[in-house]
Image (cartoon, grey):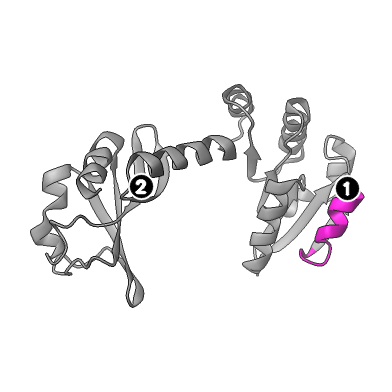
Amino acid sequence: MSKQFVVLGLGKFGSEVARQMSADEFEVLAVDRDPDKVDELKDVVTRAAIADVTDPEALRSLGLDSFDAVVVALGGSLEESILTCLHLKDIGVKQIIAKVMSPQHERILRKLGIGRVIYPEYESAVRLAKHLGFQAVLDFLPLAPGFSLVEIAPSEDIVGKSLRDAEIRQKYGVQVVAIRSLVPEQWHLVPDPNMVIKDSDVLVVIGKDEDLKKIAKGSS
């Protein structure tokens, strides 16, 4: 059975989340109070509904407690976001994922017991800073305070060497968890230590941010 998700709020962020999940063949219920926004997605998602998500009775009528997760993608009002999350907790929704607009918003939702929050503006800013600061960093994912996963282009001094001979963990204190070959395109998860690194490869590396900065500088 396909997983079932709900997206509450169909602004740019919420609409894109709904579209992407539908493209991945999940069942998606998209909800907004604006009929025009709902109309735009009615032929894309499994079901689209017009409702005021700050109204607990409107939320209950949608049967949200049977879904795998609810994404709260409200972007206009801090109060609306908090009220909606409170109502979802009362209904008994299994998993709530909420978009936040500020660190204060995040702290409030975490105190309410919302386990997962998304801060698109902050995450975009961090990614941009990493890209600009270190040319070798192709992508960046924070995992926990002080720890991240990055995709980097290999430096000239390790191209042509095996993963073992490159001694990346010994030199930088980070771990290569995967290699993405671009020619031909192929993923190597938990790569063989004898795999030879090519200049067209992308290294997926995990470690402390301070150590990742060192390897990024060494690869730029």
Could you tell me which residue is drawn at 30 percent across and 36 percent down? Answer: 209
Residue 19 percent coordinates (x, y):
69, 60
Taking the magenta stretch, the answer to whether it contains residue 185 is: no
Find residue 161 and name its label: none
Question: Circle 2 sits in a helix, a strand or a loop, which is it?
Answer: strand
Label 1, residues with CA under 10 Å away: few <14, some 14-19, many ≥20: few
Label 2, residues with CA under 10 Å away: few <14, some 14-19, many ≥20: many
Residue 124 percent coordinates (x, y):
52, 41
Taking the magenta stretch, the answer to whether it contains residue 45 is: yes
Q: Which residue is mark 1?
A: 61
Question: Circle 1 sits in a helix, a strand or a loop, which is it?
Answer: helix
Callout in the foreground (1, 2): 2
Could you tell me which residue is drawn at 89 percent across and 39 percent down? Answer: 57
* Nearer-N-terminus badge (1/2): 1
Q: Which residues are magenta?
A: 34-46
Q: Which residue is mark 2?
A: 149
Query: Rounded to the nearest whole Å, what is the CA distance between mark 1 and mark 2?
Result: 41 Å
Could you tell me which residue is drawn at 77 percent across and 66 percent down? Answer: 44
Residue 9 quadrant: top right
Nearer to the camera, 127 or 2: 127
